[in-house]
Image (cartoon, rainbow, N blue to C red):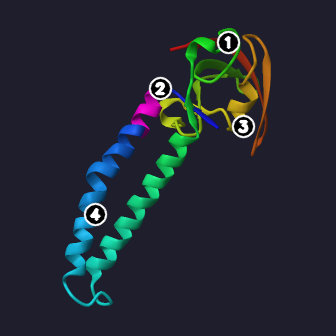
């Protein structure tokens, strides 16, 4: 079971609806058109249409599975004094004294450039459940990071 923010759940639902309602019918139409052009073994257009069809079907199935096994997070039920899903955490790396800020999200919402890390990442997992002032130890490929939690907020 995966937990998603309402925003991300709606984004994935909209993408699925778009793929099923608009993209797939167009892909099917393109495939039929390419197929009607004759010998399929020498038909690059047909092979490309089949590739696009397979890619579209794969994405549709993936989204259906994600949405089927996901639940929207009830933000009111989340603890406000501990790091949890959807919390914005400011922490200091004690070795370098560098401060960072990340929002803890599900793996389907992760976007490092936007400041969103997965709760399943080494840093995200180490921060989960900690309170302001506590030290989290994250096992990363370069070693162990000691992170002091400075603040926890929610959007």
Give above or below for 152 relative to 33.
above
Mark found first going from the N terminus, 1 or 2: 2
First-in-chain label (3 vs 2): 2
Mark 1 / mark 4, whichever is N-terminal: 4
Per the picture, the main secondary structure of the magenta-coloured stretch is helix
Residue 53: image tag: none
The mark that comes first in sequence, 4 or 2, is 2
Could you tell me which secondary element the residue under label 2 belongs to? Answer: helix
Decide which of 133, 40 is in the foreground and name it: 40
Percent x, y of residue 3: 59, 31
**In this picture, is 65 found above or below 47?**
above
Tell whether position 7 is magenta: yes
- The residue range painted magenta reads 6-12
The reply to whether the C-beta atoms of the residues labelled 1 and 2 are less than 8 Å apart is no
Q: How many marks?
A: 4
Which mark's residue is nearer the viewer, 1 or 4?
A: 4
- Identify the residue shown where x is 72% and y is 37%: 122
Q: Which residue is mark 1?
A: 79
Disc number lying in front (4 or 3): 4
> Can you tell which mark lies on residue 27?
4
Look at the image and say whether residue 121 sits in the magenta stretch: no
Task: Kindly identify which residue carries mark 2.
Answer: 6
Which numbered mark, 1 or 3, is in the foreground of this view?
1
> In which quadrant is the N terminus drawn?
top right
Q: Residues within 10 Å of mark 4 (few under 14, many from 20)?
A: some
Residue 90, image x, y percentages: 62, 18
| Residue that numbered label 3 is attached to | 122
The image quarter containing residue 120 is top right
The percent position of residue 36, horizontal first and vertical second, equals: 20, 81
Measured in 3D between alpha carbons, the distance from the residue under mark 3 to the one under mark 2, in whole angstroms, is 25 Å
Does 62 sit left or right of 80 as displayed?
left
Between the C-alphas of marks 1 and 4, the distance is: 46 Å
């Amino acid at each position: 079971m995966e937990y998603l923010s309402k925003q991300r759940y709606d984004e994935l639902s909209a993408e699925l609806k778009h793929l099923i309602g608009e993209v797939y019918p167009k892909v099917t139409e393109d495939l039929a058109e390419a197929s009607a052009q004759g010998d399929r073994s020498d038909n690059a257009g047909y092979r490309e249409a089949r590739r696009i069809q397979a890619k579209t079907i794969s994405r549709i199935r993936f989204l259906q599975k994600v949405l089927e096994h996901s639940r929207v997070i009830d933000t009111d039920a989340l603890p406000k004094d501990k790091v949890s899903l959807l919390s914005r955490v400011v922490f200091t790396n004690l070795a370098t004294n560098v401060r960072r800020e990340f929002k803890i999200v599900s793996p389907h919402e992760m976007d490092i450039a936007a400041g969103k890390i997965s709760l399943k990442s080494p840093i995200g997992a180490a921060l989960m459940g900690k309170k302001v002032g506590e030290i989290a130890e994250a096992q990363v490929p370069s070693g162990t990071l000691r992170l002091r939690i400075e603040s926890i907020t929610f959007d």
